[in-house]
Amino acid sequence: MEKIEPMTLFGYNKLQAEVKNLKSVKRPAVVKAIEEALEHGDLKENAEYHAAKEQQKQIDNRLQELSEIIGSAKIVDPGDLEHSKVSFGSTVVVSDVNTDEEFTYTIVGGCESNPEMGLISFGSPLAKQLLGREEGDEVKVQLPNGTKEFEIIEVRYQEIVFECH
């Protein structure tokens, strides 16, 4: 089965910018550092060489990971979707049934998530339980800190803010 990674145009452009930076700035700098370290001779005790090679490996691994994500990317404009039920791009206000504490989350792509800003990945345990639900529904969610029960207070679409300005 083909893996599809929904994301907004913002998320897609963010990934493309990271690839460009890795390929045109960071990787060439590491290659240069490796070349300079090679000039120092003995590789067995050449910490600069080993550190640079490790950094190169990390960059190459990240480039491979980004290539897979971008290859399975499906750009979705949440403004085009119906938001009477929770879907990709929906902003959802939930209330903890036990404490009446309210939380507001917006469901976004994995590469766009930022829990501190209320942006949660569509693949997160909470989002998976919310998707397809409507206002008034109650959901039990198994979270890392235990089971929580939420009531969905509101489902709406609003322009998504990805970064603090």
Image (spheres, rainbow, N blue to C red):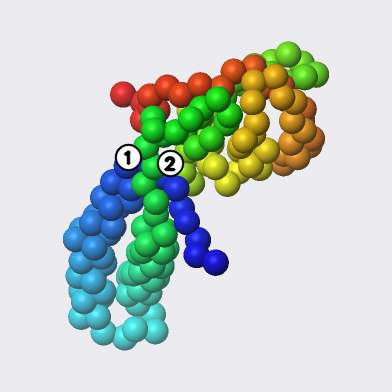
Residue in the image at 57% along x and 31% along y: 86
In the rendered view, would you say 21 is above or below 162?
A: below
Query: Taking 7 as reference, is 107 left or right?
Result: right
Above or below: residue 85 compared with residue 56: above
Q: Do the numbered discs 1 and 2 sit on residues whose CB atoms are within 8 Å?
A: yes
In what element is the residue under mark 1? helix
Say which residue label 1 marks: 10
- Label 2 sits on what residue type? Glu
Q: Which type of secondary structure does the marked residue at label 2 adopt?
A: helix
Density class for disc 1 (Cα within 10 Å; few <14, some 14-19, many ≥20) is: some
> Label 2 belongs to which residue?
112
Q: Quadrant of residue 145?
A: top right
Residue 153 image-quadrant placement: top right
| Quarter in which the N terminus is drawn | bottom right
- Direction top: furthest residue: 100
Relative image position of residue 159 (x, y in whole percent): 38, 24
- Residue at 24% x, 55% y: name it: 21
Give the crowd class for mark 2: few <14, some 14-19, many >=20 residues within 10 Å: many
| Whole-percent x, y for residue 139 in the image | 74, 30
First-in-chain label (1 vs 2) = 1
Q: Nearer the viewer, residue 108 or 98?
A: 108
Q: Residue at point 78% right, 37% down?
A: 146
Residue 120 left/right relative to 160:
right
